[in-house]
Amino acid sequence: MRAQLGDEIVVESATTGSRVRDGEIVGLHRADGSPPYDVRWSDTGRVTLVYPGPDSRIRPSKLLGHHPESLGVRGTASSASPPGSDFGRRVSHERQQLGLSRAEVADRAGMAENYLSYLEQQPADPSAATVLSLAAALETTPDALRGAGVERPPGAGRAAHHPRLRELEPDECLRLVSSRGVGRLAITTAEGPQVLPVNYALLDETVVYRTAPGTVPAAAVGKLVAFQVDHIDEAMSRGWSVLMVGPARLVTGPAADQLSFRAASLPWAGGDRPLWVSIRPLRISGRRIDIE
């Protein structure tokens, strides 16, 4: 008997051949995919160590591009494994946003840590029960993990029953903006005001971003600009927004070379963007919507 992570194990009645119990294989203990297995049973959601008997059979999963030889002991992906699916990347992102380790999320979700590692790193089609458990562990929704509504603007949900709006101190604003992300640059041009999203890094309380000559973000140099970052938690109807205002300056010479090493922020738009622009805020303000 050989199995892969995500395969289904079915236990049948010895007399009728009908299904008695089934579960999802969430952990391998041997590199060749032979027993025993960690199985998450569909009727209880619990994970147990299973040595399949003659009344058990394996049903292959719908996983794509996955073979037993690409796995190490206990299902750990090898260094040559392909990148994960959109689902896996969303799971990894939500986990890191919460500051949780794989072991912590696996414990919350009641699954084997190596199976969570597999889901993050390999293309997979997990069961609905697995998605539901992960969503609860990550404090999000199954639809969010599967990418439903990714093309919709954020904030379409309803307001909370008792929202509370409060002003943020500059130190808290800087903490929320964090080390890097995507913010919106607002500048005045000859054609009128423009607001553009840019990948940024925050270094020594200064916003820096990369751009190319002749672009709108490059036209910000020498002007007083606004830079805004926010986060919306639709499931909880809460969020925050930070606004920074300051002069945009071109960074040149050794300082620009240092930014290439210090600012781990690559523009999503790609292309050659050799210019570094900095915004040292003169004013920082922010607001947060909480639930009472």
Image (cartoon, helix red, strand yellow):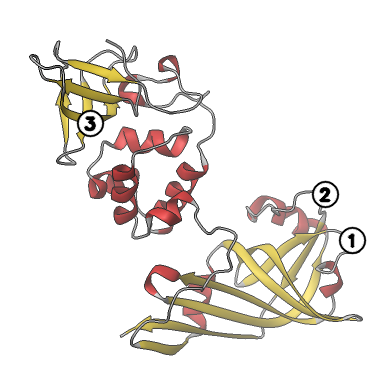
Name the N-terminal-most of marks 3 and 1. 3
Q: What is the C-alpha distance between the residues marked 1 and 2?
A: 10 Å
Q: Is residue 195 left or right of residue 218?
A: left
Q: Which residue is mark 3?
A: 23
The one of 148 and 39 positioned closer to us in this rendering: 148
The one nearer the camera, 244 or 27, is 27
Q: Is residue 13 left or right of residue 80?
A: left
Q: Which numbered circle lies on residue 213? A: 1
Disc nearer the start of the sequence (1/2): 1
Please identify the residue farthest to the front as the structure is shown: 16
Give the residue pinned by disc 2: 272
Residue drawn 42% across the image and 48% down it: 91
**Of 224 and 51, the residue lying toward us:** 51
Mark 2 or mark 3, which has the lower sequence index? Answer: 3
Q: Which one is in front, 33 or 260?
A: 33
Q: Quadrant of residue 118?
A: top left
Label 3 SS: strand
Question: Is 68 on the left-hand or right-hand side of 132?
Answer: right
